[in-house]
Image (cartoon, rainbow, N blue to C red):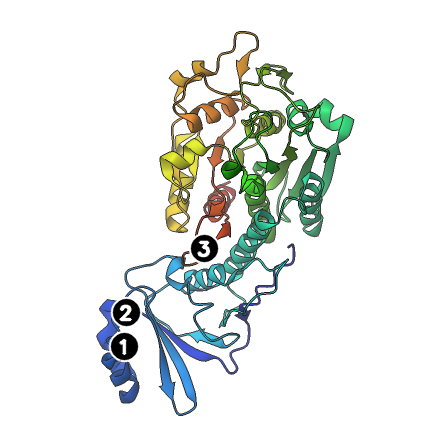
Amino acid sequence: MLEQTLECLVDNADATRPLYAVRPSGLAAFFDSLPAAQSRFLRQLDFTAAAQELLFLPGDEGVVGAVLGLGDDTSPAAFGNLAFRLSEGMPWHLQAGDYDAAIATLGFCLGAYRYGALKAAKRSPARLLAPMAQRRTRSAAAATWMVRDLINTPANLLGPAELAGFAASLGRHYGATVELVTDDALAEAYPTVAAVGRGSARPAHVAILRWSGSAAHAGVPLISLCGKGVCFDTGGYDIKPSSGMLRMKKDMGGAATVLGLTRMIMEADLPVRLVVRIGCVENSISGTAMRPLDVIRTRKGVTVEVGNTDAEGRLVLCDLLAEACDEQPALLVDCATLTGAARVALGPDLPAMFCNDDEWAEILLRSGREQHDPMWRLPLWSPYDRWLDSPIADFNNVSSKPHAGAITAALFLQRFVTPDVMWAHFDLYAWNDQTSPGRPEGGEAYGMRAMFCAVMERAKSD
């Protein structure tokens, strides 16, 4: 998973065939630019340059080119269906046109992904010529493939130890210092992570990576990232129905997204100091599992009543956030597949973003728009904070009301964030329910490219 070679790309133009990408507004001029026979061929087939419309150009030796319609789509999805519609293994090069070459390459790569670790692929993707100069595009594509691979890996093959080990390998690959915490040391330092993992025969781990860019110095921003890595979630004693448990291998999607973002930051050698904390656990049922109405004393010292054992993700994150704030980071970001309520509000494709700083929130939202990786801001609505009250502990891990579940989960996390630390929380789905252009069914890295560009902007401004 660490070495993503992007076999869908080629570096040499030899033997590549031309691929034209055309919008309806440029169709007449495009027809005029072609040899007469090819122009007649496309006209007779009523090619309109609608989005995802694809036709092959014939010649004396068979297929000599292809034409893709873009419609008015300017996103990577416009190119996201190409890899398995073009001839298998055949190399292509994009002709200049009314599109962004980097976006085109990214879309092609996103659509070329298939999880192949356990089953031989039915066919190989076509290949696209991509200049080595497109380093950021290649990095984003490789990080996305890595995130998807992590999420798609079955839980019996990717447990807490394996996820923590992968995080460690990633960090060491880029020169980070690595710390893995488990057993008694974990119970002492991260009691809420330990409480969640106590029911599983597979011990919980916390992986910590510390890295600095080659141009970093003591005065550059400290970026702190935290990820929920619940490798499988039964719901605990508040057990999920079988339909709700079916995709719970993806409950480490927040950790996977954070690791993808970490990879992009380190590959870009941003001038920042970076600390990453991944809580790696399995939420299972056993005689040692946490129970409803148990009370846990957190790293911060406050007590939490367990109103629901299926609200374990916020317990995994809260100790990580508290420790991160002790270091006074310039930016603190956490990612988690936290609530079904966020999906009810925004659907599967749009991560919910909560932020305690309006300027930082707008940078994130703008980055999402520019990178075609959107998110939507939901409020940290303080009047709902009292819904977390508990009669026997400092507060409960779930709300006493049936409403605003994503907001109350974010408010729970906010209690562990120092007010003067700039913080953003992402509640994301991390999964494509069905295949669409550039997004094969399975694990997905929602919000990652947007977060990277926002972090890069912040790094350059300091």
Residue at (54% x, 18% y) in the render: 307
Which is more N-terminal, label 2 or label 3?
2
Answer whether labels 1 and 2 touch (C-beta < 8 Å): yes
Q: Which residue is mark 3?
A: 439
Above or below 381: residue 44: below
Residue that extends furthest to the bottom in the rendered view of this protein: 60
Residue 61 seen in render: yes
Mark 1: amino acid: Phe
Residue 336 seen in render: no
Residue 112: x, y in percent?
Answer: 50, 63
Residue 180, by quadrant, is: top right
Closest to the camera, between mark 1 and mark 3, is: 3
Answer whether labels 1 and 3 touch (C-beta < 8 Å): no
Left or right of residue 95: residue 293: right
Above or below 202: residue 415: above
Residue 428: x, y in percent?
Answer: 47, 39
Closest to the camera, between mark 1 and mark 2, is: 2
Residue 281: x, y in percent?
Answer: 65, 34
Q: Which residue is mark 2?
A: 49
Give the spatial CA distance, label 3 vs label 2.
Answer: 22 Å
Q: Which residue is mark 1?
A: 30
Find numbered disc 3 in the image and state the secondary structure of the residue it sits on.
loop
